[in-house]
Image (tube, helix red, strand yellow):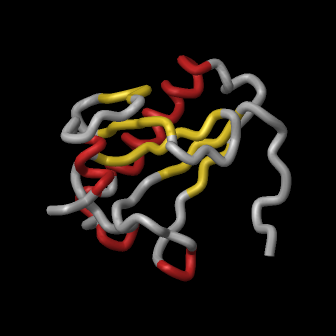
Amino acid sequence: MDCIFCKLANGEIPTDLVYEDEKVAAFRDVNPAAPVHILVVPKKHYVSLEDIPFDEMSIIADIHSAIRKISDKEGFAVDGYRIINNCGKDGGQEVPHIHYHVLAGKKLTKLVTD
């Protein structure tokens, strides 16, 4: 499979890894939209939420658990942060591998700008 996020999450391409466990990896976005911009992905390939079988939905809890650990470790839990997941082309998803954007490090404004 030729998925950039699979390659980053599984160590095939070097990245600024901030978290990793057996199911989830997190790394800094190369084009950050905030002072802290981390992408959190499952290591197993799923295109979007609709691609995850119901009996594997626990991966979403694993991702959120990782985000909680990252927010504590990186020190932005106290001031707050935003979690974004874009699903499908109309939802703004650009990479066909489910991922969560974690944005922090400044006061964030409007969620939707258009």
Q: Residue at x 22, y 33 (%)?
A: 22
Where is 19 relative to 100, above or below?
above
Q: Residue at x 73, y 31 (%)?
A: 105
> Is residue 74 toward the left or the right of residue 14 in the image?
right
Farthest residue in the bottom direction? 90
How many marks can you see? 0
Where is 38 relative to 73, above or below?
below
Q: Quadrant of the C terminus?
A: bottom right
Where is 27 relative to 113, above or below?
above
Residue 47 rendering spot, x and y as whole percentages: 32, 67
Q: Quadrant of the N terminus?
A: bottom left
Where is 109 relative to 74, above or below?
below
Q: Quadrant of residue 62?
A: top left
Residue 90 rendering spot, x and y as whole percentages: 55, 82
Q: Residue at x 43, y 36 (%)?
A: 27
Farthest residue in the left direction? 1
Residue 100 rendering spot, x and y as whole percentages: 49, 51
Residue 79 rendering spot, x and y as whole percentages: 77, 27
Q: Residue at x 58, y 20 (%)?
A: 74
